[in-house]
Image (cartoon, rainbow, N blue to C red):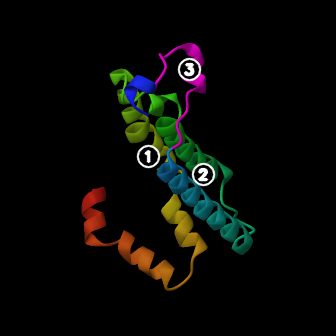
Amino acid sequence: MPADEVPPLTTHTAFTQWQFAPVVTVGVIVAAMIYLIGVGVVRRRHPARPWPIRWTVSFVAGNAVIVIATQSSIGAYDDVLFWIHMVQHVLLLMVAPPLLLLGRPVTLLLHATRNPVHTTVKRLVRSAPIHVITF
């Protein structure tokens, strides 16, 4: 939304001014659906050791932070107010990624899949480029 079309930031608009970002919405929904399907697969295959709810909550919370940072009033005012833009950066760079990683999506992928996907993911995770990035 262009800066001249955004109403002044007030307490009311801080909670009611939202903008729709279709690409973000689709990405978050697809990621959450794939994750939740994986959780269902793990619960069916390993009933004695189901996927911990805290990990699922963490992943969903990370997705919620992405939606809030891009589509709430933070997203609506990010081109208008510099400090809001910086809050958006903090949410997208320092809050959402740890929450997503605490959801352990790679571990879920390993638990939910079998060969050849399982083997390919293990090979990728143990590869030299990933080793260099993580250490």
> Is there a contact, CB below 8 Å, between mark 2 and mark 1?
no
Residue on which disc 2 sits: 55
> Is there a contact, CB below 8 Å, between mark 2 and mark 3?
no
Does the stretch in magenta take in 43? no
Q: Residue at x 49, y 80 (%)?
A: 117
* Percent x, y of residue 26: 54, 55
In the rendered structure, find residue 38 and report the number of the disc placed on it: none
Residue on which disc 3 sits: 13
Q: Amino acid at mark 3?
A: Thr
* Percent x, y of residue 49: 69, 65
Q: Residue at x 52, y 64 (%)?
A: 107
Q: What whole-number distance in Å separates the C-alpha atoms at marks 2 and 1?
A: 13 Å
Residue on which disc 1 sits: 97
Q: Label 3: how many residues lie within 10 Å, few (<14), some (14-19) or many (20+)?
A: some
78 up-or-down from 55: above or below: above
The magenta region covers 6-20
Q: Nearer the viewer, mark 2 or mark 1?
A: 1
Residue closest to the far front = 5
